[in-house]
Amino acid sequence: MGIVYDENNKTLTLHTKNTTYQMQVDRYGFLLHLYYGKRAEGCMDYLLTYYDRGFSGNPYEAGNDKTYSMDALPQEFPSLGTGDYRTPACIIKNTDRTYCSDFRYESHCIKEGKYDLEGLPAVYAGAREAQTLEVVLSDRVTGVRAKLLYGVLPEYDIITRSVRIINASSGHISVKKLAPACLDIVGGKYDFITFYGRHAMERNFQRMPIGHGISKIGSLRGTSSHQYNPAVIVADRETTEDAGACYAMAFVYSGGFQSEAGQDQYYQTRVLMGFSEEQFAYPLNPGEEFQSPEVIMSYSSEGLGKLSQNLHCCMRRHLCRGKYKETVRPILLNSWEASYFDFTGESLLKLARQAADLGIEMFVMDDGWFGNRDSEMRGLGDWKVNEEKLGCTLGELIGKINDMGLKFGIWVEPEMVNEDSDLYREHPDWAFVIPGRRPNRSRHQLVLDFSRKEVVDYIYEQICGVLDQGNVEYIKWDMNRSITDVYSATANSQGRVLHDYVLGLYDFLERIVERYPDILIEGCSGGGGRFDAGMLYYTPQIWCSDNTDPVDRLQIQYGTSFIYPASSVGAHVSASPNHQTGRCTSLKTRGVVAMAGTFGYELDLGEISEEEKDEIRVQIAQYKEFAPLVQKGMYYRLTNPQTADEGAWEFVSEDQREALVQAVSVRQHANMTVDYIKVKGLKENTMYRETESGRLYNSTALREAGIPMPAELGEYRAYQWHFVQEEA
């Protein structure tokens, strides 16, 4: 398949359908990176250059050869202590308290199928779909080993990377920094594309030149965060949506991370993805191992659009799991913006009846159904149904809603606790609080210590006790604060606690997935604060943002689309004026934007007119028609809503016989000029019929000239065109 070892040149080459990744074991045992790019054959070690670089040091084995220096050579797994003064992928504190790891090649093996990672989410694939390369490096002085893992999925142009640190020394060591993916590029000028934001305005697109020094993003919040997403793109300066070279790295991890990019003194570029350094120091006793999460990597020579499609297909088919990974999700109504905490069982049933009348398929009861939870001040941790508030048991409520023809879903926030709760009063040591210090509160809550198994086990049993009371078919899994005050009474090192917390979360989710395989779980963390590839392994959709304003959502969903498939994007139609921005938009505009994800509603149906109810019925029928295309189609960004007068995007079926183009005007001017939306992905010079108008269009003309945006008065107008190939 895709992995080839050349004994003569000591090269290991990873081929996918359109790309090649090559490394070489050199004469001193260093594992050098040679090439990652468009598919190519042969040995690329001619790309390495050797000459006297002055203050760049030389390995002892090089003798008098001053032309050989790790300070300039591209490497697969650069570590501190070898004379490479660039930012390293690995820092280990050894038994003798030194910081040096001189990793040299020891062995390799090639296996059929994709490796898996115990206790961690990872891309999966069968023996005929993927191969694994394992390369063992060792420090011959300390005995510490690094096992580099590469997974190759040829059909998707995907390579994954992970690393396992093995303490084969005679004493205690500590892993102080670890980045499982490093990319050294010897030439060229590149941009660093990242996705920044804040609560309710996540994953904004940012593109900046990679220059001398380090550009660094990351999260110290214990989660992947609203502020930066754990995925980056490195693109040639001239790369566009449709042409040019670009690389992606997506961390399959839901905790703290960092990504670094910079040019060295010789204008070479290094990019890293891994753990955040500031709160990470993982101890290993003799014989113990530490397994990193993996990074999904892809390369495209055909621009950013193709790169995104590579990632979308991989995540949708080989990262998401379960019943709903590729099936159309039910159209739901979430109760939160309809009533917040102020509801009763009867008011919920009234809202559910209204939803059923409109053709909505699932009713979700959000926060406020348990303990004494009538505000965000109290009750978290007490996962006991408030039957007095509901006026019945949970099972009875679910039965009544099921009798309306609706599925039932429920909101939970298992990782949190209020101080005003029975759980905290009984187990105050189960929350993250540093002894002798007063904790930082956020949303009036503390974080439970999920690094401790007894805490995870207790909450798991409580949540299962709720889920077992009736036919629950959906869970909204929330987490509404960042982590501070990190201290665990049971940890042998506080530097391991945050990672162990994430492992505890994954253990909890894995048990839920195994016990309830037919339940759809939607991830959430104040909206998009934990929107990452790690969560997608357990939750095939994630609430994209707490901001449901459709105009803001254009920008949020635009940034999200560079890495994550539309099938993972939780998107709802909410009220107008919008509860987060106060902006007024039409029901049509709200519907078109929400249809670019897992469609649903979040508003008080009792407050809308009969005309709006009829429009919702039409929207639901439309979405059911378009949902398979949205779920599985190839996604194209047609404009950048940050800079263009409209946001426009497109879904195209894999056989190219059908396309859905959607657009929203963002900026309106007097005497408006006409913008043309250029359609992509259709068969060359083929006739397509637009289903609403019945008009025929030539695909080449749609691509080259586009379709005009209607010049209508009014703000934030939405449009969609559904094209179907005309039969000859």
Image (cartoon, helix red, strand yellow):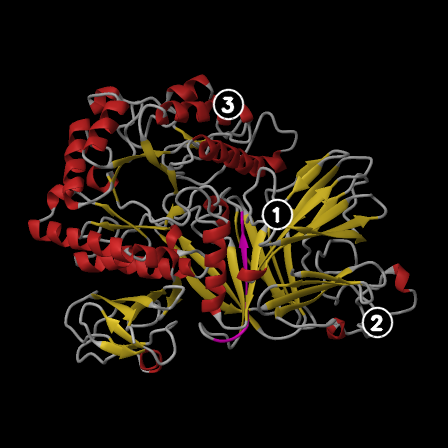
Question: Picture coordinates of residue 443 (x, y %)?
Answer: 36, 36
Rendering coords of residue 214 (x, y %)? 60, 62
N-terminal of the two: label 2 or label 1? 2
Magenta residue span? 243-252
Which x, y percent locates residue 303? 49, 72
Q: Relative to 540, does residue 211 appear above or below in the rendering?
A: below
| Mark seen at residue 429 | 3
Q: Is residue 144 left or right of residue 121?
A: right
For the residues labelled 3 and 1, the Cα–Cα distance comes to 26 Å
Q: Is residue 251 magenta?
A: yes
Please name the residue shown 50% across and 65% down the image: 307
Q: Residue at x 58, y 54 (%)?
A: 129
Residue 526 position within the rendered picture, expressed as x and y whole percent measured from the top left: 37, 43
Q: Quadrant of the N terminus?
A: bottom right
Q: Is residue 549 visible?
A: no
Q: Residues within 10 Å of mark 1 (few under 14, many from 20)?
A: many
Q: Residue furthest left?
A: 610
> Which label belongs to residue 178?
none
Dot in front, 2 or 1:
2
Q: Residues within 10 Å of mark 2 (few under 14, many from 20)?
A: some
Could you say which quadrant of the image residue 262 lies in? bottom right
What is the quadrant of the C terminus in the image? bottom left
Res. 408 in view: yes
Q: Earlier in the sequence, mark 3 or mark 2?
A: 2
Please, what secondary structure does the residue beneath circle 3 have?
helix
The front one of 597 and 443 is 597
Name the residue tied to disc 2. 67
